[in-house]
Amino acid sequence: MTITQSTKLWTSIFALLCVVQLLGYAQQAMLNPTAPLYIIHLGGSPFVVGLTISSFAATSVIARPFVGYWSDRWSESGVLGFGLMMLAVSMLLWFVPFVTAVLLANALRGIGWAGVNAGGYALLARIAPESRRGEASGYYSGAQSTPTVIFPAVALWLMQAPFGGYDLVFTIMMALGLGGAAVCYLMARQIPNLRKHSDLPQSAAPWWRQIITLSERGVLLPASLMFCNQLSFPAITSFIVLYAREIGIESIGSYFIVSGITSVLARPLLGRVSDRIGVGYSLLATFMLQSFALILLVVAANLAMILLAGVLYMLGMAIGGASTLVIAMNRATPERRGRFMASFSMAYPLGYGLGAFITGSAIDMIGYSWTYLLLAVLGGAGLLLTMLNWKTLR
């Protein structure tokens, strides 16, 4: 049985899905500033920070075809709940004060992250009204970005508080994963017959061929655009705390609050703008804003300039995320929606992981300023890709 499409967006299922994503992304928001500082505390370097983030991205990419297959054949909400449980359980290894344990823990988190994103996007593509997909993706990504308003600053405050420390932060992160799994269970009870296995067309190919198939028709363009959109994101979220320390800027917690508020307020609004002006113009704005923000960081001499760069970058990220998600939802076929959205969502960890590795390696070799300039130049790839596909995007 399928959900009947209508123009109503705010159903109980959509609301609970947004809550689940908020809790899952809250854990990630707390880890963004915590992980680099913790790894440096354990004796690591910026290169090790990049390698740790890349291990998270690598397992997330590898797991996506599998969770996409099970999203189609089993349950989107089941895959989503599994991912949240993995996020919670993997936090146990963060209590072991060794860099190798942190590497393993983040690799396990990547598997959970694959479930959270692939299951969530597949369910969103199924329940969002076709005429309001830009708006739906705006609210959905807004729920994902809402934790960036306060949770990174809370993590930094807890690490420095007399009663706090890294262990307290890790405990809260585990609780967030468990809380998300509980809400997902409540949501799943409302959609027990969302789709039966027998409703899906059966493929003649063996199961392992269906899982390993990565060439979902039409996925390359939205995935490539999302990859470009994510490439410089680690430099803005994780490495920014190390950069601020390098140039002598204190109270960097306010940066996460300001940039987070920008992201939360912008995503629903810019999702509607994407519906009206089209994804082509939206993507042009995305990559220009991101590159300009990165260049601004190169010359940043005080907290105000860093805050401005964060606002501009998050505006670009907000409109770009909504636009690429609309392209993906429009191209996904019903019988392979889970695998299509899983293939599309691989662009998130690929871009984020490679961006983290490039950022960490470049910082060790050429320093922070030149690294941000390099990332600004790499951002031009997204602008070029948009122009080359302008007719299709219009």
Image: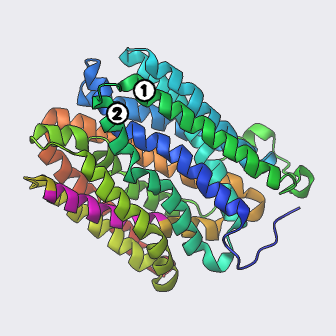
| Residue assigned mark 2 | 158
Q: Main secondary structure of the magenta part?
A: helix
Residue at image x 31%, y 41%?
238
Residue 376, can we see it? yes
The spot of residue 243 in percent (x, y) is 18, 41
Residue 251 shown in magenta: no
Q: Are marks 1 and 2 in contact (CB under 8 Å)?
A: yes
Q: Which residues are magenta?
A: 304-321
Q: Quadrant of residue 277?
A: bottom left
Query: Residue at point 62% right, 77% down?
Result: 132
Q: Is residue 225 above or below residue 40?
A: below
Q: Is residue 50 visible?
A: no
Query: Picture coordinates of residue 367 (x, y %)?
Result: 13, 39
Viewer-closest of 113 and 185: 185
Q: Amino acid at mark 1?
A: Leu
**Mark 2: which amino acid?**
Leu
